Amino acid sequence: MTRTVVVTGGGTGIGLAVAAAFAAEDAHVFITGRREAVLSKARAELGDRVSTVVCDATDPVQIEVLRDRLPGQVDVLVNNAGGNRELDAAAGRLGAVGLGGQPGQGPDDLAALAAAWRANIDANLLSAVLTTAGLSRRLASGGAVVHIGSFAADRGAGSYGAAKAALNSWNLFLSRQLGARDITSNVVAPGYIADTEFFGDRGSEEFHNARVAETMVGRAGYPDDIAGVVRFLASPAARHITAQVINVNGGAVPTR
């Protein structure tokens, strides 16, 4: 039976690789994102097994529209939409919202600080909460929800790291709820992933080499590394894995 898969933020980077992995197994994949042109380009690359829906995952109204565009059953939901709004602000992509310690913001600019923290919480936590709640009744028994977190949750990385840490905690709550319906819920936490838009114009050779040096395997991660783990968590082999954070960081942040 053909599975229905929804990947938020599926037009680029990790989301695109995840969508490609599921499309390769003949699933019907719906990719969402805020930029129609990016989604259209992704669909042209991935083929007619992929459908696109323009949707800002932080907007409840747009999620309702997304829900109405989907089939009656969703087998796999991948909450990938997000990003570090601190980096976006520093690059001028979100305007001068700033964050405490960012250039151009004084230590007493509490309004800007609040706006910056809310931007990262909305993008990286609320997006997953709203999308999962909005599609909850369509999630099929035996299905899987996978959230894309970050090793930043364990590195004290400001508002972005705090939002990803909150995602990990919320996943425990969600796992209990969905487990009663035979639906698993896990977080995949990437480390440094090359070939994405995440770091914008900060991706210099020096920056890349420093991130690689943190790993034990001597290389950067790539979107396909994450897509493979997501696909596994949504497979029959992973039916007894839930409420977990799966770290995929080349050993940059090891466990015991």
Image: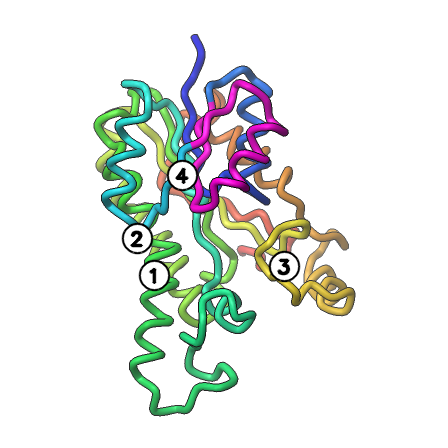
Query: Nearer the observer, disc 1 or disc 4?
Result: 4
Dot 1 or dot 4, earlier in sequence:
4
- In the figure, 252 relative to 26: above or below? below
Left or right of 200? Residue 100 is left
Is disc 3 placed on a helix, strand or loop?
Answer: loop
Query: Nearer the observer, disc 2 or disc 3?
Result: 2
Residue furthest to the front in view is 37
Residue that badge 4 annotates: 54
Residue that badge 1 annotates: 121
Q: The residue under label 3 is which amino acid type?
A: Ala
Left or right of 206? Residue 175 is left
Dot 2 or dot 4, earlier in sequence:
4
Q: Mark 2 near mark 1, Cβ–Cβ under 8 Å?
A: yes
Q: Which residues are magenta?
A: 29-52
Q: Mark 2 near mark 4, Cβ–Cβ under 8 Å?
A: no
Is disc 4 placed on a helix, strand or loop?
Answer: strand
Residue that badge 2 annotates: 126
Query: Nearer the observer, disc 3 or disc 1?
Result: 1
* Identity of the residue drawn at 31% across and 84% down: 110
- In the figure, 87 relative to 51: above or below? below
